[in-house]
Image (tube, rainbow, N blue to C red):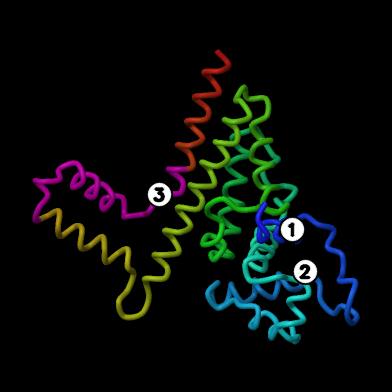
Amino acid sequence: MGGEQAAVVRLLWGTRAKPARGPRPTLDLDRIARAGIELADAEGLAEVSMQRVAAQLGVTKMALYRYVPGKAELVALMVDAAIGPCPEGEGRRGDWREQLEEWARGLADVFGRHPWVLEVTVGPRVMGPGELSWMERAVAALDGTGLTGAERMDAAVLLVSHVRGITQQARAASGAEGGAEGNAEEQLGAVLGELMREHGARFPALSQALASVAASGGQDQAWEFGLHRILDGLAALIDERAR
C-alpha cells in the first residue's frame, strides 16, 4: 500500500485519535471535512486548498497539517463526510426493487447537493465507511434473490453509474443555461430540429425519435427510463434464476 493510500486508510478508518504532541488540539477531522465541504459546495473543488480550509477554520496551514497530511487526504475526508452513512430508512422498505429504487433516488439527492463529489469518486481509490455503507445497503437489498455476490455487486455498480451519469448531465445543462441565452437544452433541441428538417432523410430513425420527443413536450425522461430499465433487467434475471 502506497504512502498516500495508507494515510487515507488511517484517516477514514482509524480511531481518529487526537495528536499526542504539541498544544491542546483545537480541531478534529469532522470539522476539517465540513469546512472543506462548505468551500467545495460554494465555490467548486478547484477552490479547495489546505490554505483556504485553514483560513475557514481560523488556524494556520501548519496547524491543519497536524491533522491532515495534504490535499488528497483532505478530499478523501470530504468525500466520505459529504456522502455520509446511508440513512437508516434508505432502501429498507418493500421488496428488493422498491428498496433499490428508493436507494437510487437517495444517492441522486446526495450527488445533487454535492456535485463536486462526482469529480473525485472515479478510478481505484480507498473508500470510507460512509460511502461503503451505500454499497452495503444496495447489495443487501438483493439478498435472497438468487443472484450471486458478484452479480449483486455489479448491479449496485450499474445503478451508481446511472445515478452518476444523469447527475453529471443535469449539472452540465444547469451550468450552460441562464441569462439572455436561455435554456441550453432548448436551444440544442431547436438546432437539432432544424437539422432534421433539412437532413432528416439521411437519419430517418433519429428524425422520427426527435419528432416523438417534440410531440410529448420534450420532457427528459432519461432518469426514470434508465432506472426502471435497469430494474426490469434485474427482475428478468432473478425470475430466470427462480425457474
Task: Give the side of residue 217 with respect to residue 20, left or right.
Answer: left
Residue 224 is situated, as x and y percent measured from the top left of the image, at 46, 46
Q: Gap in Å between the C-alphas at discs 3 and 1?
A: 37 Å
- Which stretch is magenta? 198-226
Disc nearer the start of the sequence (2/1): 1
Q: Residue 221 carries which label?
A: 3
Residue at 72% in and 61% down: 7
Q: Residue 29 carries which label?
A: 2
Q: Nearer the viewer, residue 188 or 24?
A: 24
Residue under numbered circle 1: 12
Q: Which mark is residue 39?
A: none
The amino acid on which the numbered mark 2 sits, given as a three-letter code, is Leu
Nearer the observer: mark 3 or 1; the answer is 1
Q: Is mark 1 on a helix, strand or loop?
A: helix
Magenta span: helix, strand or loop, mainly? helix
The amino acid on which the numbered mark 3 sits, given as a three-letter code, is Gln
Residue 207 is situated, as x and y percent measured from the top left of the image, at 18, 47
Q: What element carries label 3?
A: loop
- What is the quadrant of residue 189 in the picture? bottom left
Task: Give the side of residue 26 with respect to residue 230, left or right.
Answer: right
The amino acid on which the numbered mark 1 sits, given as a three-letter code, is Leu
Residue 117 is situated, as x and y percent measured from the top left of the image, at 57, 62
Residue 42 is situated, as x and y percent measured from the top left of the image, at 57, 77
Q: Which of 42 and 200 is in front in this view?
A: 42
Task: Give the side of residue 202 with respect to residue 171, left or right.
Answer: left
Nearer the observer: mark 3 or 2; the answer is 2
Residue at 26% in and 53% down: 214
Q: Kindly give the residue lying farthest to the top in the view shown.
A: 243
Q: Gap in Å between the C-alphas at discs 2 and 1?
A: 9 Å
